[in-house]
Amino acid sequence: MNKALYQQKLTTADQAVKLIKRKCNIAFGMAVCQPPALLKAIAEQAKQDGFDELRVYYLHAEEPANNTILNYDLMHIIKPHPGFLGAKERQLILQGEKDHRKVIFYVPNSFSHLPRYFRESIELDTFVVTVSPMDKAGYFTLGTNNDYSSTAAKYAKNLIVEVNKNMPRVFGNSLIHVSQVTAIVENTVPLIELKPRKPLLEDQRIGQTIAKLIPDGATIQMGVGGVPDAVCSYLMQHNDLGIHSELLSPGMVELIKKGVVTGNCKKINTGKHVFTLAFGDKTMYEYMNDNPAMESYPVDYVNNPSIIAQNDNVISVNSVIEIDLYGQANAEFLAGHQFGGPGGQNDFVRGAYLSKGGKSILAFESTTKGGEVSKIVPKLTGIVTDLRIDTQYVATEYGVIDLKGLSSSERAESLISIAHPSFRDELRENAKKLHLF
């Protein structure tokens, strides 16, 4: 019966996207689960005036979207509503400014809130996503990406899936039954792979410092970048770590393979490696496939501070664009414009601190632009991602501090102590002007 239903719904990408209304809201899966064939078909139909206006909701675009629907020539029809800005969106914004057009419509969000947006605030006509092949019981899985995809798949009027044999079959709460699907397209192509930069010397120093703050038996969450990768490399001698993380990365999977991560000390999802999105390489995706220890859940579960806090000794490591002398952190705004997005950073900043023995760590190199600009500033120039009352540990290559329980003056002095030496005098002068000293 399931096979017959599958064949009944199997079609081409061009035919599948004809289900989409001429003017409506659509969404696509983020990062690895972007469906290349379907996005290309949507772009082609838009070029042929097959749509009047599509509001397109998503969080993080990669090549499949960047090379198809995120085409400047289609911006009169395609109206991108991202929850995160990448290089492509920033490029489109600059092009639009030259023509005095607004072409990107950023949706402020906390990653953990996106499922609720799709349940209550954004009515979706169609959701398109890449899934793993159907099993004998009639179930596909969302593979690398659960995040908002599981909710969007449930609440969209039309669910169109692109089956890719390379997408891993993943356990947890990741199932979609063939009866829930409107149309099926088959397209087996290589999955997108993460190309991380090699950790710098400063990253390695920070990583080594942070690793010392992580006890055996801790549950870890790591963000993206050189510092989290460096931290993982210094955890190889630890024991019985657990994973409850927004992102599952190759560094974490290597810790699992080495037996460093077991999940045995976790209070919830014991023995399971919990994530809401995975981004890595082919080797990692193959390791995830049909691995019962890997469990993905919706982002409003994984990133819920009250869920995070149920594990003891949660260690959260994230980065920032800048932090000021009050302890306010900006992880998303640069040069007067939205640059990226908050993701789930604040969820884990709060969740980790609520955890018994937990530590929230904001880690970053002390300077940027070749040492010309300090990331520790007198007062934020951008949006506040993390409130000063939420910030706990802060780490640079010059050390690590704990801001909890400190006065405003002590906070400023501590932050200055881990700033690059060439900026410390200037920061002290500014602290005086701000009446912090």
Image (cartoon, grey):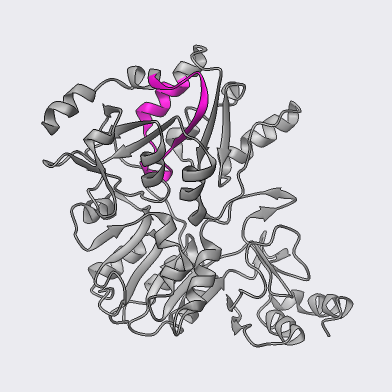
Most foreground residue, 27 or 246: 27
Does 77 appear above or below 418? above
Name the side, left or right, on which 236 lies relative to 118.
left
Does 321 appear above or below 310? above
Residue 358 is situated, as x and y percent measured from the top left of the image, at 46, 80
Most foreground residue, 360 or 177: 177
Does 337 appear above or below 204? above
Name the outermost residue toward the top. 48
Magenta span includes 34: yes
At x 24%, y 71%, the residue is 271
Q: Looking at the rendering, which quadrant does residue 45 occupy?
A: top left
Image quadrant occupied by the C terminus? bottom right
Name the outermost residue toward the right. 433
Question: Across the whole image, how many numbered discs are drawn on residues?
Answer: 0
Residue 419 is situated, as x and y percent measured from the top left of the image, at 68, 76
Image quadrant occupied by the N terminus? top left
Which residues are drawn in magenta? Answer: 19-43
Residue 237 is situated, as x and y percent measured from the top left of the image, at 31, 81
Is residue 236 at all visible to an observer of this figure? Answer: yes
Residue 407 is situated, as x and y percent measured from the top left of the image, at 73, 87
At x 72%, y 80%, the residue is 416
Is residue 201 at all visible to an observer of this figure? Answer: no
At x 46%, y 64%, the residue is 304
Most foreground residue, 387 or 379: 387
At x 58%, y 78%, the residue is 392
